[in-house]
Image (tube, rainbow, N blue to C red):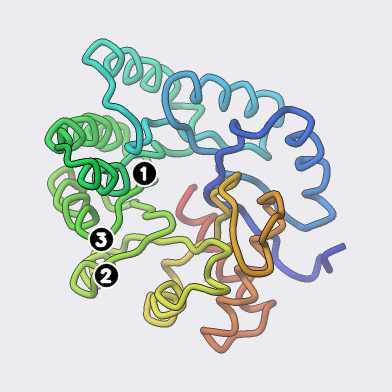
Amino acid sequence: MMNKVYAPLIDSHIHLDQYDDPKIEQMIRSLADLNIQSLISVAMNLSSCQRTEQLAQRYPSIVQPAYGYHPEQPLPDAQELQTLLLWIEQRMDQLIAIGEIGLPYYRRLEAIERGELLDEQGYQDVLSALLQLTARYDKPVILHAVYEDAAIACDLLEQYGITKAHFHWFKGYPETIQRMIHNGYSISFTPDIQYEQEIQQLAAVYPAHLVMVETDGPWPFEGSFAEQMTHPMMTADVCREWAKIQGLTEKEARQILYQNTLSFYT
């Protein structure tokens, strides 16, 4: 049981809808003893949004829903996109953020390996439509945009005047990192901070007041997490590793990460 003199943690990015109901029930019941306050549950598409909404209704205050269209999947057709946009717009008073949205970096790499071309403009158009909705209602946005895609995302965020941007599991180039810092965009670290040098280097330079922790569950991790079901309790491991990199005590780190997440999402 986590000592409650420590600040609680918030898993700032988890695909809760992708776990089955018994695992979700078990997970939710464990959170109080682990001193985890809430889970920001992101969505992939309309059906994912609908299941996430049901989970938020089942576990109010613990499951904080974010609705969007994940870019690492086929493009929605025009009708599908409009249906999703309307569905989200009707729930603006219920959602905590728009997300997960972004650009298909990994899908593009897979297409290149197959000798195919991806409709990159189509993905940018979907992202633009969702960012316009974000800007209209002044909501936070959760982004999947890494390396060269992050610069495009920054262009669009600046175009629409969005400042509350959370780049989850971010990887990027130095010039983009500096641009994101200048704009005050937040990032979050996953359990791979334990064993990925690139992530550890990013954690050393990104300002502490712009950092959160996440699991991106059920995505699996390596190292000491190998063959384990990804669980929000792993945010404590992320916190401890980040604390070491930053030269902080675990108590100090938890307080910073908790306040950062709370401030960003309220």
Binning the other alpha carbons within 10 Å of mark 1 as few (below 14), some (14 to 19) or many (20 upward) gives many
Foreground: 117 or 99?
A: 117
Foreground: 150 or 36?
A: 150
Q: Are marks 1 and 2 in contact (CB under 8 Å)?
A: no
- Give coordinates of residue 85: x percent, y percent: 32, 20
Name the residue that disc number 3 marks. 147
- Give coordinates of residue 88: x percent, y percent: 39, 22
Indicate which disc, 1 or 2, sits on the residue closer to the N terminus: 1
Name the residue that disc number 2 marks. 177
Indicate which disc, 1 or 3, sits on the residue closer to the N terminus: 1
- Residue type of the residue flagged with mark 1: Val
Q: Residue at x 39, y 31 (%)?
A: 68
Q: Residue at x 66, y 37 (%)?
A: 61
Name the mark nearer the viewer: 1 or 3: 3
- Residue type of the residue flagged with mark 3: Tyr
The correct choice, above or below, for 122 with respect to 243 in the image is above
Indicate which disc, 3 or 2, sits on the residue closer to the N terminus: 3
The correct choice, above or below, for 7 with respect to 167 in the image is below
**Toward which corner of the image does residue 247 lie, by quadrant?**
bottom right
Q: In the displayed structure, does residue 190 sit left or right of residue 252?
A: left
Quadrant location, the N terminus: bottom right
Label 2: which secondary element: helix
Among all residues in the image, which is located at the extreme right? 1
